[in-house]
């Protein structure tokens, strides 16, 4: 069949990622890779900063603020509404540690959360005496509202979930869930690690109180970059666990006056890896030239193309919802009768040494694919051909292994 390239000049897009000549990278949902122009700008910034320090930093600090503006624009927020972080997990912890908790307070989350949510909640359950209630995921808004309602009690304080789940790749009906929470007087928190950069994300359309994400997956920025958003009326409710130079709007030892910044800068203090966000700004500028609607359309096309190939093969079982509006750039499936870890090892050996890199989801003994902007239909075809070889060869361990 003739393949569609929805991103104009897609060969030029791929050329910005020279490693694609050696590997088939289908794991952007773990770590994205930087486009070469952005990487060069980032490396130059780090080099200048480490050589000259503040003597050469003025231009770069303007670019850092361009990253703040760009990230805020992507989610429909004001720049002051966000705080730079090291990753999405940081943002989860800023809200969880910043809110006041009493023993017996409850949090509703889903059964398909990454450790970035599960582990902080598990720790708080032990250290703070909160209760964590789990809801099964569904892409249907009515279903999720009903399931949340069945779990809610007068002690429910927070609804916390991933916009797109890291396991099955289900895009949750976030707007419906946040509306339900708001109607019950419950705070809502969205982890957008697997949606930002893969599909449109708007905090106003979603209606969440808090949102976190990273810049190292679908935004293809440097590793160790992320941000946290809080609505202006919610930000002052969060008490930082750590304070340092930069956190306070007013600080006077003579009078004892102390006042936190009312915006996200209350969470930014001390000497930090500032130049990382020059890299974020560079990656965002590179994407802007492509046009985000074009990026989203390309990712959607490849996702649907891959799902079609999976559903056409009896040996593969699709776990991700088939409708794209109920999913995003992640596609998860089971290779029947095979251990997913073994399959991933075989994929890395396949296609004439052009190794295929995927993600294993142990919970479902499944393989997860990321259909990123730099991937093409030929990458999907190579994956499917390799899977055909693996399943024709037979064998493999019980599907219970690793899941």
Image: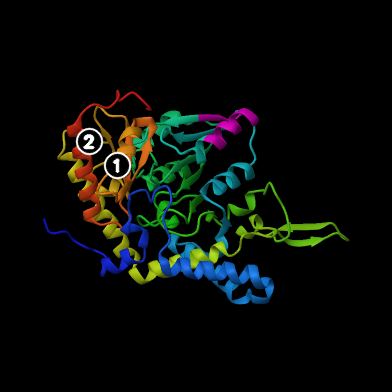
Q: Is residue 205 left or right of residue 238?
A: left
User: Do the numbered discs 2 and 1 sit on residues whose CB atoms are within 8 Å?
Assistant: yes
Tell me if 281 is positioned left or right of 309 in this view: right
Picture coordinates of residue 2 (x, y %)?
12, 59
Query: Residue 295's quadrant in the figure?
Result: bottom left
Question: Is residue 394 rendered to the left or right of residue 48?
Answer: left
Q: Which residue is mark 1?
A: 347
Q: Residue furthest left?
A: 1
- The residue positioned 25% from the left and 48% from the top of the image is 351
The answer to whether residue 261 is magenta is: no
Residue extending farthest right: 254
Which residue is tagged 2? Answer: 390
Q: Does residue 210 lie above or below 113 as drawn?
A: below
Q: Quadrant of the N terminus?
A: bottom left
Q: Is residue 159 left or right of residue 323?
A: right
- Against 357, residue 231 (above or below) is below
Say which element carries label 2: helix
Q: Is residue 126 magenta?
A: yes
Of helix, strand and loop, which mostly describes the magenta segment?
Answer: helix
Please tell me whether residue 206 is drawn above or below residue 390 in the rendered image. below
Stretch of the chain drawn in magenta: 119-132
């Amino acid at each position: 069949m003739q393949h569609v390239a929805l991103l104009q000049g897609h060969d030029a897009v791929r050329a910005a990622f020279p490693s694609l000549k050696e590997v088939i990278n289908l794991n952007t949902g773990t770590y994205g890779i930087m486009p070469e122009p952005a990487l060069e700008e980032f490396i130059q910034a780090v080099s200048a900063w480490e050589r000259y320090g503040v003597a050469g930093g003025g231009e770069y600090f303007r670019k850092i603020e361009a990253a703040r503006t760009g990230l805020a624009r992507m989610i429909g927020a004001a720049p002051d509404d966000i705080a730079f972080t090291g990753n999405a997990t940081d943002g989860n912890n800023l809200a969880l540690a910043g809110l006041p908790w009493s023993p017996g307070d409850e949090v509703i989350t889903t059964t398909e959360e990454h450790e970035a949510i599960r582990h902080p909640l598990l720790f708080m359950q032990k250290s703070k005496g909160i209760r964590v209630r789990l809801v099964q995921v569904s892409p249907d808004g009515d279903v999720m509202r009903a399931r949340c309602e069945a779990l809610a009690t007068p002690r429910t304080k927070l609804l916390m979930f991933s916009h797109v789940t890291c396991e099955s790749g289900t895009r949750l009906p976030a707007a419906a869930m946040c509306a339900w929470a708001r109607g019950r007087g419950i705070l809502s928190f969205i982890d957008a690690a697997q949606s930002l950069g893969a599909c449109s994300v708007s905090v106003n359309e979603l209606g969440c109180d808090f949102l976190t994400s990273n810049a190292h997956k679908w935004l293809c920025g440097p590793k160790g970059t992320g941000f946290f958003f809080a609505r202006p009326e919610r930000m002052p409710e969060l008490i930082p666990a750590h304070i340092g130079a930069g956190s306070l709007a007013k600080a006077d030892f003579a009078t004892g006056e102390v006042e936190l910044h009312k915006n996200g800068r209350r969470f930014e203090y001390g000497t930090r890896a500032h130049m990382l966000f020059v890299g974020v700004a560079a990656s965002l500028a590179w994407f802007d030239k492509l046009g985000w609607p074009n990026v989203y359309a390309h990712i959607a096309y490849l996702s649907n193309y891959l799902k079609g190939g999976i559903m056409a093969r009896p040996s593969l079982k699709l776990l991700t919802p088939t409708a794209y509006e109920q999913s995003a750039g992640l596609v998860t499936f089971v290779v029947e009768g095979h251990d997913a870890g073994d399959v991933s090892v075989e994929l890395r050996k396949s296609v004439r040494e052009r190794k295929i890199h995927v993600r294993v989801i142990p919970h479902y003994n499944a393989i997860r694919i990321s259909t990123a902007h730099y991937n093409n239909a030929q990458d999907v075809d190579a994956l499917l051909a390799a899977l055909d070889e693996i399943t024709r060869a037979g064998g493999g361990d019980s599907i219970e292994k690793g899941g």
